[in-house]
Amino acid sequence: MAKPAENDSAETSDLAPEVHLPGLDELRRIVSKYGRRIIPSGSAVRKDGVAGLTVAISAVPEGMAGGLLAGTNPIYGLYANLFGAVVGGIFSSTKLMVIQNTSAVSLVAGQSLVGFSPQERDHALFLMVTLAGVFATVFGLFRLGRLTRFVSHSVMTGFITGIALILILSQLPTLAGHQVEGSNRITQVVELLRNIPRWDVASVLVGLSTLGFALLFERTPLRGFAGLLAIAIPSALVAGFNLEPVELVRSLGEIPQGLPAPALPSFARLLEVAGGALAVVVIVLVQGAGVSQSVPNPDGSTRRISQDFIAQGLANVASGLFRGLPVGGSVSSTALNVMSGATRRWGGIFSGLWTAVILIALPGLIGYVAMPALGALIILAGFRSIHMTDLQTVWEAGWAARLAAISTLVAMLLLPIQLAIALGVAVSTLLYVSEAASDVSLIELKERPDGQVEEYPAPSRLPTNAVTMLDVYGPLFFAGARTLERLLPSPEGSQNSIVILRLRGRGTLGATLAQVLFRYIAKLKEVNGRLYLTGLSQQAHAELTRLRELRLTGPLRIFEATSIRGQSTRAAHAEAEGWMVAHSGEDPNVQPAGEGCPS
């Protein structure tokens, strides 16, 4: 008996490697597929690594300047660039978008912290950034990214172009080596041009040489390193020749070595920073949506705005916990990431990792980077983020699109960015309402002898003793409903006229449309007429039935929609013809509302 037991044991041992747990192969396949999609290949590591390094170096002065704009330590901007880029890059659906600190959100954050003392400012900042991240994450989880669809392409084009121009104009003083003051970018540029004799020649030459090197190396096999070399060579020349008038990165403040430890912010003043957090998140999400719209994924995969909301939200939570400024989709860093040859999401992630390396190992070296070189590269990235095809499309779309784009662009240049965005949203809303109202049309339906239905322009007046079938195209919100009221045929001068109005596909009617229908019913009642509404959903039917005015209007019949297209309209037409034969010239025998022919 021992021998078979040994054989059984041997068989079991031999077969053990072949045993498969249920679902294990599928799990392995999913992990392998996700790993291949996320983990970059060798060539991708090289391309995205170089792009990330270029972005990281160029973002150092902007990140430190963001700290100054927010009225806090400049190092907080570098912490934001580190954790925002890594966390945001992992979760973003727009793979080439770099999520970092931007001047726009730094300005808003600084303005929101005006009421705090210098001792309280840092703690309030980290709490506000964390809370903004929570808001953005919640917005994404509830799929509120679809609300960005109500911001028109014209407004978004004006917004992106305005941001690009702000980037260009903001770096002109750096390129000239002469700082100026002004209430907005336009006045600053005017002041800069008035002081051309005071420009620093060495700074201008450094900036122009950076542009030249960038354009030159892009035409060589070293194009993947073009941005990095364009920064490094002029900076090395500045250091080698000791050109002291040229401003360096270290002039913005010392870069301490090492990484911050995570810390949970104090929630003692949560309500005081909630408004600022909401303002920050609006700027972050609108700007991020604009960046996402301008940067398609190289592999053609779909960009999901709500997922980008979540990515930017988690990035802000991480930044707040690690003592960083607010972060969002950066126009300049994203454009520079693309220009530097990034192919996947790792370009943005590497920019954060390189920032960590800079903070740990190279805090002194990065301080010697020439500011005019960085400014020149940002100017080039700003020019390349202006899409002339989009501007041409907007211009050819008509005066309304032009007005929306130009007004948003001008507002970006002259007003605080939060007011400019509010204006853009308002313009989008007005355009939507205007187009919705003008896009409503009314047609008459007539059945031909062969059974097909032909469309005709709706009559201006109703014929006597006749049934008129109407269909309406376009949205019937409040503006569209009032347009429909002007288009409905007038019952004046007619008798015993029945109107069949087809409203299929409209889930709800709304108060304005209901009032329009009630007023039209009252006019029909004066001439012995009736109104049949067909194709109504159950929700729209219930909505009309609940309204008090319905009890005062007898000549109304409702026919709910069925799964067969046109069935409720044909049923209404058959009943209308029968009523016309029986009641022509008499007062209609009004039945209770809602008892139409079931269909």
Image (cartoon, rainbow, N blue to C red):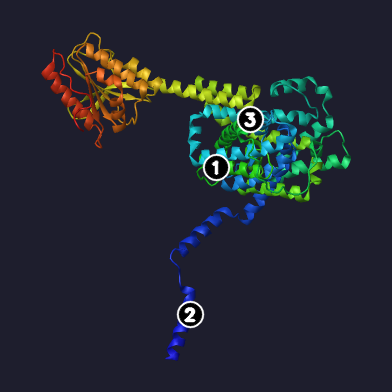
Disc 2, disc 1: CB below 8 Å?
no
Which image quarter is the N terminus in?
bottom left
- Which mark, residue 318? none
Residue 180 on image: x %, y %: 77, 24
Q: Is residue 341 visible?
A: no
The residue tagged 2 is 14
- Based on the displayed image, in which of its 4 quarters is residue 22 positioned? bottom left
Disc 3, disc 1: CB below 8 Å?
no
Residue closer to the observer: 118 or 241: 118
Residue drawn at x 73%, y 32% is 71
Q: Is residue 424 visible?
A: yes
Q: Residues within 10 Å of mark 3 (few under 14, many from 20)?
A: many
Mark 3 / mark 2, whichever is N-terminal: 2
- Based on the displayed image, in which of its 4 quarters is residue 40 positioned? bottom right
The residue tagged 1 is 310
Residue drawn at x 47%, y 64% is 24
Q: Amino acid at mark 1?
A: Ile
Secondary structure at badge 1 equals helix
Mark 2 / mark 1, whichever is N-terminal: 2
Residue closer to the observer: 388 or 493: 493
Secondary structure at badge 2 equals helix
The residue tagged 3 is 163
- 233 left or right of 591 in image: right
Above or below, 265 against 208 in this view is: below
Q: Amino acid at mark 3?
A: Ile
Distance from the alpha carbon under mark 3 to that under mark 1 = 23 Å
Q: Amino acid at mark 2?
A: Asp
Mark 3 / mark 1, whichever is N-terminal: 3
- 439 left or right of 488 in image: right
Marks 3, 2: nearer the viewer: 2
